């Protein structure tokens, strides 16, 4: 006990303890190991994929109906109304493969009815981790350790933080992005510069 008190009384011992505690705190913040055991599921519908309009009442007369026996004539409203916009269209897609962490699910590049684009992750299942992002990249998807670090070597666009490590989610592609330049999607850990999983986008 006397020796312990004498050791703690030395300034260098206190300094070492302070550094050790600070280092442990920084390590916990930086690595956030508890996230490996914390799942976050996010389920989003594809925008514009589900119609919410109510079915028409078959017993109600339609606007512009002609009297019985008279030939039907198109109303001005009907003739002038534009055709309904097309629904979402899948332009490219692929299956996720595992990199640093076991990862599965599918990726789709989808053009919505309004002309905007989203990258959609479907049935995603990967590990949680610090600072995970969804990247649209021009890098090839390689299996094994050779594919872990390639996605920041060329051009890439971050579509934002990963919303959840499980589920189906949409990520908006900025309007000024030239989609012809990008061929893959990576679940990218920006803190440690490593891919958790990735998919090649094969054109539909």
Image (cartoon, rainbow, N blue to C red):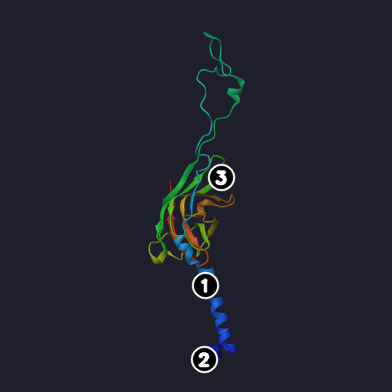
Label 1 sits on a secondary structure element that is: helix
Q: Vertical placement of 50 versus 159: above or below?
A: above
Position of residue 52 measured from the top left corner of the image (x, y, whole percent)? 53, 34
For the residues carrying marks 2 and 3, which lies nearer the camera in this image? 2
As measured in the structure, the alpha-carbon distance from the residue carrying label 2 to the one carrying label 3 is: 71 Å
Badge 3 vs badge 1, beta-carbon distance below 8 Å: no
As measured in the structure, the alpha-carbon distance from the residue carrying label 1 to the one carrying label 2 is: 31 Å
Residue at the spot 56% in from the left edge and 15% down from the top edge? 65
Label 3 sits on a secondary structure element that is: loop
Badge 1 vs badge 2, beta-carbon distance below 8 Å: no
The residue singled out by tag 1 in the image is 27
For marks 3 and 1 on the same chain, the one whose residue lies earlier in the sequence:
1
- Residue 21 position by quadrant: bottom right
Q: Nearer the viewer, residue 172 or 202?
A: 172
Position of residue 80 measured from the top left corner of the image (x, y, whole percent)? 60, 25
The residue singled out by tag 2 in the image is 3
């Amino acid at each position: 006990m006397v020796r312990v008190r004498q050791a703690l009384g030395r300034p260098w011992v206190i300094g070492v303890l302070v550094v050790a505690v600070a280092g442990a705190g920084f390590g916990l913040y930086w690595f956030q190991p508890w996230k490996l055991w914390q799942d976050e599921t996010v389920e989003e519908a594809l925008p514009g994929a589900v119609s919410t309009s109510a079915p028409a009442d078959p017993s109600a007369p339609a606007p512009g109906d002609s009297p019985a026996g008279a030939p039907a004539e198109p109303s001005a409203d009907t003739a002038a109304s534009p055709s309904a916009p097309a629904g979402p269209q899948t332009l490219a897609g692929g299956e996720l493969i595992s990199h640093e962490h076991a990862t599965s699910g599918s990726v789709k590049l989808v053009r919505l009815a309004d002309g905007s684009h989203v990258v959609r992750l479907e049935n995603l299942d990967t590990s949680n981790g610090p600072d995970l992002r969804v990247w649209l990249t021009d890098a090839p998807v390689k299996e094994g350790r050779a594919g872990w670090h390639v996605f920041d070597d060329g051009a890439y666009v971050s579509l934002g933080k990963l919303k959840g490590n499980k589920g189906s989610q949409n990520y908006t592609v900025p309007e000024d992005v030239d989609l012809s330049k990008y061929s893959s999607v990576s679940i990218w850990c920006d803190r440690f510069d490593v891919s958790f999983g990735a998919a090649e986008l094969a054109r539909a």
